[in-house]
Image (tube, grey):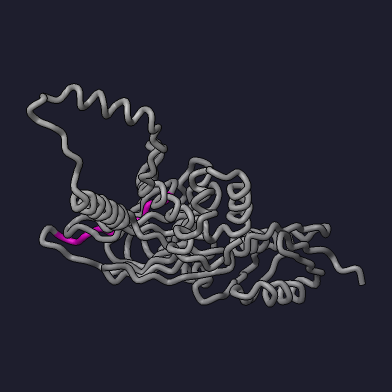
Amino acid sequence: MPHQHYRLEDFIGDETFRHWVNRTDALHAASWDDWLREHPGQAALAEQAADIIRGLHFDKPPLDPAKTEEDWERLRASLPAAAPVRPLRPAWYRLAAAVALLLTALSGAWYLASRPVAYATAYGQKETVTLPDGSRVTLNAHSRLEVPRRWAGGQAREVWLEGEAFFAVTEKAAPGGPVKFVVHTRDLDVEVLGTEFNVKQRSAQTTVTLESGSIHLRPHDPRLAPLRLRPGEQAELDGGRLVPHRVADPARFSTWKQGQLVLDGKTLAEVAKVIEETYGRKVVLRGAGLAGLKLSGTYPLDNMDMLLRALALAAQVEVTYDDKQVIFDNRTD
């Protein structure tokens, strides 16, 4: 199977991948299903390639020679005798082929130009993106951001987020006034003019933490009223409730940008959730009382091996792990 760093053109050029897209070969389809489950970071790019393959698929079923001859004779009989039908000259065939090729290329170019730009990170990865307006977005692990290829002048700058990202939005003016920047998530929209904030949308919970500026939250649930946040405030949308509260240091909720996990009395159960979200490993707290064990300090987040060694030392526990899970247990010595 292909390497995990496949590019868009690699997917499109892979015959086995095209079989998977069109479901024309059961063996290849099953192999690609397994590979994509093992490489979730490539899922967004693979789906983009699949959309292109579907959009440019102009193959027609093979013609039946007998049926073609029958239709041709019927057409000739229906034409006036004074207007004999003459075959196309070879030059016309070449011209028709060139036009068809051009139309296919234009269709593909239009399709690509109309598609939003997608940025995706795998487990254990981060990426910083500079948007067309100069705003900067840092994606946390296992996250996805979609951005239109261009924003119309004076209209809202809209992006779509799955996962977690930190936004440093540049204020933009237009003849009609400041231009809003809108982050769409599954549960709510975040509207700003120019500010810095963190958005985390994981499982059934969405959390927005504001460092500077001002933002408006507009839940998709019509039963929930919009909410305005000020610097140092955080709002959580969980279980059908949008709850705002103050936080002492909003910057500590985005220390993942610097590859740090800052713990200030967090429990090992909360740390386990961070490990699962960042590295995609299931965490098992096997020892009695481990879930409520509280930890403090700063730990390396960009290197799972170093993080687990540091946690084992700080919590005085044993840690074992493989490609699928991490197990915390009380020491036996």
Residue found 61% across the figure and 56% down from its top: 35
Residue placed at 59% from the left, 50% from the top? Answer: 28
* Residue 299 colored in magenta in the image: no
Residue 320 is situated, as x and y percent measured from the top left of the image, at 79, 67
Query: Residue pushed farthest right?
Result: 333
Q: Quadrant of the N terminus?
A: bottom right
Q: Which residues are magenta?
A: 177-185
Q: In which quadrant is the C terminus drawn?
A: bottom right
Front residue of 249 and 110: 110
Asked whether 182 falls inside the magenta stretch, the response is: yes
- Residue 165 image point, x, y percent: 45, 63
Compared to residue 70, the image places residue 202 above or below, namely below
Give the number of callouts: 0
The answer to which quarter of the image holds residue 322 is bottom right
The image shows residue 95 at horizontal and vertical percentages of: 20, 53
Question: Compared with residue 133, is residue 156 higher up or lower down, i.e. above or below?
Answer: above
Secondary structure mainly formed by the magenta segment: strand
Foreground residue among 196 and 97: 97
Look at 17% across and 59% down and name the residue there: 153
Relative to residue 331, is residue 219 drawn left or right?
Answer: left
140 horizontally vs 329: left or right = left
Looking at the image, which is closer to me, 292 or 246? 292
Q: Is residue 245 in sight in this rendering?
A: no
Q: Residue furthest left?
A: 82
Asked if residue 93 shows in the view, the reply is: yes
Residue 129: percent from the left, percent from the top?
Answer: 39, 70
Q: Nearer the viewer, residue 260 or 81?
A: 81
Task: Name the residue rendered at 17%, 65% in the picture.
Answer: 173
